Image: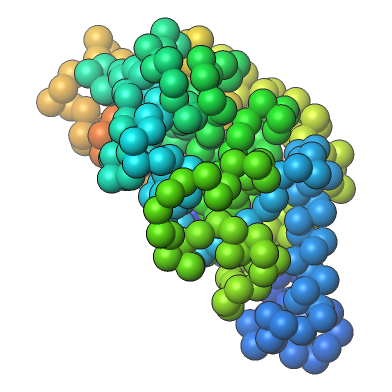
Amino acid sequence: MANKVYNFSAGPSVLPEQALKEASAACMDFANSGISILSMSHRSKPIGDMFAETEQFLRDLMGIPENYDIVFLGGGCSLLFCMVPMNLLGQNATADYADTGVWASKALKEAKQFGNVNVACSTKADVYNHIDKNLKMSDNATYLHITGNNTIYGTEWHSFPKPKSGYLVCDMSSDFLARKVNVSDFGMIYGGAQKNISCAGVTVSIIRKDLLGKVDRNIPTMLNFQTHIDAQNMFNTPPVFAVYVMNRTLKWLKDIGGVDVIEKINREKAALLYGALDASKIFVGTAAKEDRSIMNVPFVFNKEIVSAEKNDELAKEFLDFAKARGLQQLKGHRSVGGFRASIYNAMPKEGVQALVDCLGDFEKKVLG
Ligand SMILES: *Cc1c(COP(=O)(O)O)cnc(C)c1O
């Protein structure tokens, strides 16, 4: 590897170097057993202990109360999109869903298979460039579903809406542990791990104990959250390695001071990058200012400076310019275009500074 690389990928994404080193070492020898973690029985004591520790780290970091269970499952967040309504939403019941992005709309599409869905807001017509906080909720909803951070569009709920009835359910895939949240404000928090807390292969569900077992339908054993709660996440072979990468990532987060500390750093990083975009002549952020995400920062060329004809060629030039400095994976999502810098927990401030310098230097190169 030549020079230092900063990976701005939206997911799977950057992880703490320390966690990667420890996870790599465990592939050769886990817990001084002489056996690779990849080859060790999930029923063994070292793995059982590691699962318990991972759960405890998560409880400590997020302040998860005793009346919430934690489930680690494979299948990705997309499987949870269907498991959530399958386990929580009765056939004749209604759930409110805030349509704030593609992930939100995928979640509500699944819910329609299990009960009634009321779309409480949608900003689809504006390519989800902001969050409509004026929710039209039903009188008797079982829950209100939101997406904490809209990974593709770079918008984030900065204060969480209060459900009119029922409880709040949140897909927190891309801002898990990025900022302090009060778990008791939610009935359920869930998400894929590969954005901020581990590699792909595991999801995290945090579920208030009293919410399960209320729907009158047959739930396949594997898709029933209660199965995994009862079996302490060992009903079948769980994604052990992905849980270990999470364990090491959470340990890193604890070591640097926990969520309060990382939130402060995340806000500094976001302010640095948005400040540079706001001061730039050639680049502009695409998300509404009041909803700007502290995790994903999409930006495009200013149309008044860069004509539509020149856009694609100059975009390629910028991505090459950035890559030559070790700044990688900055291409935007196809639905927004342009660029996106994901500045998750493990992205150091130096990486964001290097990007800010790169934006400035590229502007000078183009505009003189
Ligand atoms: C990436 C992402 C998903 C999808 O996760 P998979 O694990 O790939 O299914 C869902 N929700 C949000 C907010 C995401 O960022």
Q: Is residue 365 visible?
A: no
Q: Nearer the viewer, residue 58 or 174?
A: 58
Tell me how the rendering is colored: rainbow
Q: Nearer the viewer, residue 35 or 327?
A: 35
In the image, 85: left or right of 209? left
- Residue at the outermost left position: 309
Q: Nearer the viewer, residue 81 or 363?
A: 81
Q: Position of residue 305 (x, y in %)?
A: 27, 13
- Residue at the outermost bottom position: 34
Q: Quadrant of residue 116?
A: top left
In the image, 84: left or right of 179? left
Question: Which residue does the image show at 22% across and 18% down from the upper left?
Answer: 125
Q: Is residue 167 visible?
A: yes
In the image, 309: left or right of 291? left
Q: Where is the C terminus found, in terms of image quarters?
A: top left
Q: Is residue 358 above or below residue 12?
A: above
Q: Is residue 65 above or below residue 77?
A: above
Total marks in image: 0
Q: Position of residue 162 (x, y in %)?
A: 56, 16
Question: Which residue does the image show at 66% across and 35% down from the upper left?
Answer: 178
Q: Quadrant of residue 298?
A: top left
